[in-house]
Structures are given as C-alpha cells and as structure tokens.
Image: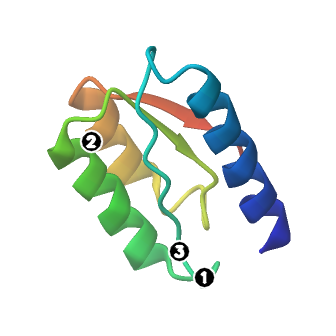
Amino acid sequence: NEFFATMAEGAKKHQSEHSDQYELIVNGIKDERDLSRQAALIEEMVSAGVKAIVVAPADSKALVPALRRAQKAGVIVINID
C-alpha cells in the first residue's frame, strides 16, 4: 500500500535525524486483511521489549485484545486508524 510505504519512509527519515533518541522497527502485513499476522507482530514486539507501538489496525475491534495486552505490559500504543 503506497500510503503505508510513504508513512514508513517518513518515519525512517525522522528516526535517522533523531537516531540518538530512539530506535525504529518497521513491521507490516502484506495483505491488509491478515489480522492474525498483525496480532502476531504486536505480540512479537511486546516480547522484544519495545516501549511503544504505532499501529494502523487491519481491524480495530479485532486487535483490541492484542493491544490491551501490550498496554498491560507497559507498552505505549498509538492507534493511527
């Protein structure tokens, strides 16, 4: 999706200009309907110990359980839906 690719490039540019402030990990799903993969990515990021997750949910209601677990683990969740 061109929109998400452009957004990722902007995030990478910002991070490169502020590399001393934070690390950026860009993950995404190839098919916007792959909800199970998106939920798995959220779980993987929580397990990796990230401090924040910025997410454009494939299905905002269906991802609530995974995002709630992330919040309970102390991860800041930013929904850009």
Secondary element at tag 3: loop
Q: Closer to the camera, 68 or 51?
A: 51
Residue under the image location 56 percent in, 57 percent down:
61
Question: Which amino acid, by three-letter code, is at mark 3?
Answer: Ile
Q: Which residue is under mark 1? A: 33
List the residue tagged with mark 2: 69
Q: Amino acid at mark 2?
A: Arg
Residue 76: image location, x then y, percent: 42, 25
Identify the mark nearer the N-term, 3 or 2.
3
- Which of the 4 quarters of the picture holds residue 36? bottom left
Give the Cα separation between the discs numbered 3 and 2: 20 Å
Q: Secondary structure at mark 1?
A: loop
**Callout 3: 10 Å neighbours few (<14), some, many (20+)?**
some
Real-space CA distance between mark 1 and mark 3, rounded to the nearest whole angstrom: 8 Å
* Quarter where residue 43 is shown: bottom left
Depth-wise, is mark 1 or mark 3 nearer the camera? 3
Is 1 placed above or below 67 here?
below
Side (left or right) of 62 relative to 51: right
Query: Which numbered mark, 3 or 2, is in the foreground of this view?
Result: 3
The one nearer the camera, 15 or 49, is 15
Q: Residue at x 83, y 62 (%)?
A: 3
Q: How crowded is the residue under tag 1: few (<14 C-alpha within 10 Å), some, or many (20+)?
A: few
Neighbour tally class for label 2: few under 14, some 14-19, many 20 plus, Cα within 10 Å:
some
Identity of the residue drawn at 77% across and 74% down: 1
Residue under label 3: 29
At label 1, which amino acid type do we have?
Answer: Arg
Q: Furthest residue to the left?
A: 47
Asked if the residues shown at circle 1 and circle 3 are in contact, with their CB atoms under 8 angstroms apart, the answer is: no
Q: Residue at x 40, y 32 (%)?
A: 23
| Left or right: where 19 falls relative to 44 | right
Q: Secondary structure at mark 2?
A: helix
